[in-house]
Amino acid sequence: MRHETVDTLNRKADKAELGFWLYLMTDVIIFASLFATYLVLRNNTAGGPSAADLFEPRYAFVETLILLTSSFTCGIAAIAFKFGKKQLGLGLLMATIVLGTAFLTLELLEFGTLVREGHSWQASAFLSAFFTLVGTHGFHILIGLIWAAVTGGYIMSNGLTRNAVRKFTLFSLFWHFLDVVWIFLFTIVYLLGELS
Amino acid sequence: MIDFLLGRLSTEYFPSDPVTIGAAVGMPLTVVGLVALITYLKRWKWLWNNWLTSLDAKKIGVMYVIVAIIMLVRGVADAGMLRLQTALAAGDATGPFSTDTFQQVFTAHGTIMIFFVAMGLMFGLINVVMPLMIGARDMAFPFLNSISLWLFVAGMILVNTSLVFGGFSNGGWLGYPPLTELQYNPGPGVDYWIWSLQIAGIGSLLSGINFAVTIIKHRAPGMTWFKMPIFPWSVLVTSVLIMLAFPILTVTLALLSLDRTMGMHFFTSDLGGNAMMYINLIWAWGHPEVYILVLPAFGIYSEVVATFAKKALFGYKTMVYALIAIMFLSFVVWQHHFFTMGAGANVNAFFGIMTMVIAIPTGVKIFNWLFTMYRGRIRFRAPMVWFLAFVVTFTIGGVTGVMMAVPALDFQVHNSMFLVAHFHNTIIGGVVFGFFAAMTYWFPKIFGFRLNDRLGRYSAIAWQIGFIVAFMPLYALGLMGAVRRIDSYSDPTWQPFFITSGIGVLIIALGIGLFMLQIIYSVWKRKELRDTTGDPWDGRTLEWSVPSPAPHYNFAVQPVVTHRDEWWHRKKTHYQAPHKSEYRDVWLPKNSAVGLLIGLMACGAGFGIIWHLWWLVGLLALGIIVIIIIRTTKDDTEYLLTAEELLKEDRRAKGMAV
């Protein structure tokens, strides 16, 4: 079996965390490109409805609250795991998953309504950009939910090993990152949309 | 049901003209032949254990280089077809190829040369030597490294599949819409282009992260930033550029693909689409991309010139600052690729001036190399000849680049043969020559014997002469009004220039032939060319401190660095080899077939998207997710090499009694 020193384990965790941060920065560029695309195209409605006509900031505000709360439970879970409170941490992780799922459901419901009313991604460049930008965030949330479930399962079966905590740290970085992206989304798509 | 299972696969996509039929039959036959040969030689197990599943960066690097060289042959064959057509199709004459074939060929030529030759050679060489140069045992994430390799191979397979089935894009290497939109290009060609680049590009992105973390975290103790050789510096800067630029490519290709498959309107001509946004996005990636390619080559030249002039590199710190300056500036010049868009005089002036400014750090580097040679004891070995060819060729390319940085002049030569000549000047002269220099220079470190020097020099000279003959006429043609990508022309006075250029391609092909011959001849004579010292060129940096071929653990004892040219310093100060007691246990990555599996599945998924086989895409995407989950929840991915075993292996590698 393995006889690694604490030192090499720490180094490994360090490395993974740096690599993950760098990955997140590349994801920032992905979202930045999509935001830029959205801003360029948001008035290209091809005679159809604009952001002000379509979006309901209050609805998005509820989504925002749910996602922020999930980030909060995720943060507390990280602290719980750090202090070895496995059950509490797992419970909070479960709460994070439930809230994330609720967020995603709300988003999909919104998409469904738009498409049913004839405002699908094929209707105009503005709607293409909207669905792609918000959809990419939603897709990240989906990946995050799968990841959360896998990490939870890993902790349940392997206990709170160093490796498990490391995996959870990376997940929580990802989850908080998605939260930050959503803040920009909420501001640029929904709030500025109302102003235009 | 049939529609669901077969998507848009149909027999109408089988090739119909003789040239593509030849390729479509020849390629699968070559693959079958290779498989038969390996089976006959009973080498499958060896191939699987020693190469395909290996996580050793050096082996991954060699596999990259092999794939890239195969693709180089295809890319040059494409170039030959292009020049054959233009040499013949003057006035009323028609060339051997139809317009559509010609368009596919120039698209394939550009795509292959940039993504699967230049990028492949670059990643390969970085894998081979970067960890050795910084005194590291391996990459930071060896498993991720193998995923990168196999995604690269997946993209390569897709490009070549298009030759057999469906045809390739005819939209040029950057696939400008609206030509590449569904409306004008309903076939699978553009989708092949999109997905081969998308898959290989994700591999590149992962490599960028991997290299950066390796350099930040794995440098030998004592190797502070300003004691790190220039090649790793150039790799670090390139990695930052990859991390900042490749996501833009990912997004751009994804948006074009959404237009084509989901009926969106990002770049279409109707419903508010904006094709110029595509041009902006693709060049926001595309310009940094040319620096991504050339900076590692600059790093290689810095190592080569110092070694063969037997002098420390002149102006080391200015070299580093120049690299960093280029890193920033490469993001504020992209608009010079389309001054003619009509962004206005002020915007054009800004980008024009920035383009001239970026020539300054590049010029600084040229002078640094020249001053390194000044009063050095220069040995004209093959890598040095490649370097000298670079200085001449690249400088000419740089000068014509600065000419085109003037918007008023650019309006005259935009998208003309002048531009074609310019970027080949910089990419062949800068990137290709550098990678050939590197292959010759570091070959003994990986394979344990040198390459024949005379053939190497002949190859370099053939490339250099061929280059001049092939591309100088294109400058003239550009000024005479020839635009790029034409398959025929009415003015017969252009024909002599095109014929001359075609002859140049033949001379370049001779250069490649000589390079191949050099490898074959050297393998044959490998006993005489054996490198027993580990330091065949009297080198300066750490990779020459280990035996050749470099052992799989790289360094038996972790080196501690005190000087910039650490190995040179050790040779001058009677450095003592480490004592028995200094050997430590090391953990090394176990082989893994998961990277290969992910690559194959990504290739299949890409094929599925191209042909609208959505069930296949779904299955394989799910498969990839499951595999990644299994792999990441597995802890037992390394094996132990104990200090005693390490000592034994080290002594064996150094030819001492065990």
Image (tube, coloured by chain):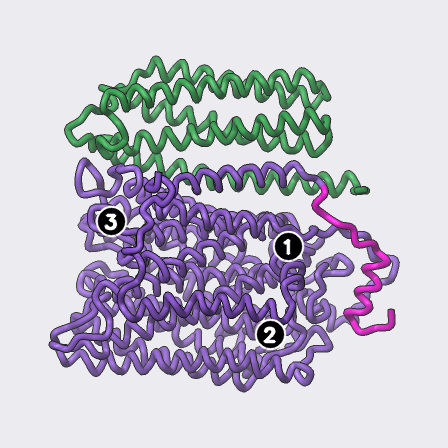
Chain colours: A green, B purple
Q: Do the residues labelled 1 and 2 touch (CB within 8 Å)?
A: no
Q: Give the range drawn in magenta.
A: B636-658
Q: Tell me which residue sits at (24%, 61%) in the image.
A: B406
- Does residue B158 sit above or below B94 in this rendering? above
Which chain contains the residue that carries disc 3? B
The residue beneath circle 1 is B55
Residue B354 image position (x, y, % from top left): 32, 54
Q: Which residue is at the front of the view, A138 or B543? A: A138
Residue type at mark 3: give it. Answer: Pro
Q: Which amino acid does label 1 sit on?
A: Leu
What crowding class fits label 3: few (fewer than 14 Cα within 10 Å), some (14-19), or many (20 or more)?
A: few
- Residue under disc 1 on the same chain as residue under disc 2: yes
Residue neighbourhood size for the residue with mark 1, other residues' Cα within 10 Å, grouped as few (<14), some (14–19), many (≥20): many
Query: Same chain for the residues at labels 1 and 3, yes or no?
Result: yes
Q: Is residue B181 left or right of residue A74?
A: left
Q: Say which of B152 and B410 sits in front.
A: B152
> Is residue B592 found inside the magenta-colored segment of the image?
no
| Residue at the image point whose x is 66% and y is 55% from the top | B138
Residue B160 in view of the camera = yes
Q: Earlier in the sequence, mark 1 or mark 3?
A: 1
As helix, strand or loop, the secondary structure at mark 2 comes to helix
* Residue B89 to residue B416: above or below: below
Q: Give the CA separation, mark 1 to mark 2.
A: 30 Å
Residue B646 is inside the magenta segment? yes
Host chain of mark 2: B
Q: Which of B557 and A125 is in front in this view?
A: A125
In the figure, residue A117 lies in which quadrant?
top left
Q: Which residue is label 3 attached to? A: B186
Give amino acid for label 2: Thr
Q: Which mark is residue B307?
A: 2
Q: In the image, which is nearer the foreground, mark 1 or mark 3?
A: 3
Query: At 29% from the left edge and 77% from the top edge, which residue is drawn?
Result: B472
